[in-house]
Amino acid sequence: MEPAQWLADYRDRLERAAYGAQRASESLREVGATATSPRGEVTVSVNAAGALEDIKLVPAARKLEAEALARLIMTTAREAQRIAAGRMAEVMAGYLGDNPALIEITKHLPAEVVR
């Protein structure tokens, strides 16, 4: 292969990689999740990293004991984090494909999230 052709091919691969990285980054910014407790007392929203963004409590939550409410918030937050992790894994799988990097990214996710 001629050096000029090799360079052109290399440049094309870099441009495709940069475009893919930009799309993945945009997709990850939109990833997050919201979960609601079974009876609707608590709704928790998290971002792609699983960090809390919002917690909403309906008036029925006031009827719960403090410890029960705390457990319900934690359980609901974990569910939102599980959903967000699954979405993040899907986005990264679309970008990385079946790749050791994807395994490294997803190895700490709950088993039900990683397919």
Image: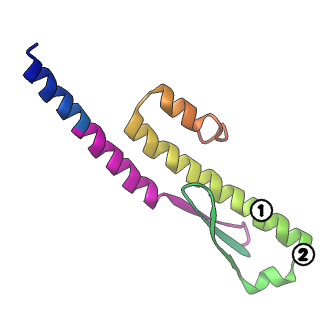
Q: Nearer the viewer, residue 100 or 80?
A: 100
Residue 57 horizontal side relative to residue 32, left or right: right
Q: Nearer the viewer, residue 79 or 99?
A: 99
Tell me the element at label 2: helix
Q: Residues within 10 Å of mark 1 (few under 14, many from 20)?
A: some
Which mark identifies residue 74?
Answer: 1
Tell me the element at label 1: helix
Q: Quadrant of residue 35?
A: bottom right
Residue 79 horizontal side relative to residue 74, left or right: left
Q: Of label 1 and label 2, which has the lower sequence position?
A: 2
Q: Amino acid at mark 1?
A: Met
Tell me how far mark 1 sits from mark 2, CA to CA.
12 Å
Report the magenta residues as a range: 15-40
x and y, in percent, of residue 68 in the image? 88, 69
Q: Amino acid at mark 2?
A: Ala
For the question of whether residue 43 can be seen, the reply is yes
Which residue does the image show at 45% across and 27% down from the upper left? 99
Q: Nearer the viewer, residue 20 or 79?
A: 20
**Does 58 sit above or below residue 32?**
below
Which mark identifies residue 52?
Answer: none
Residue 104 part of the magenta segment: no
- Disc 2 target residue: 66
**Does 111 sit above or below residue 2?**
below
Q: How is the image coloured?
A: rainbow
Which residue does the image show at 86% across and 82% down from the upper left? 63
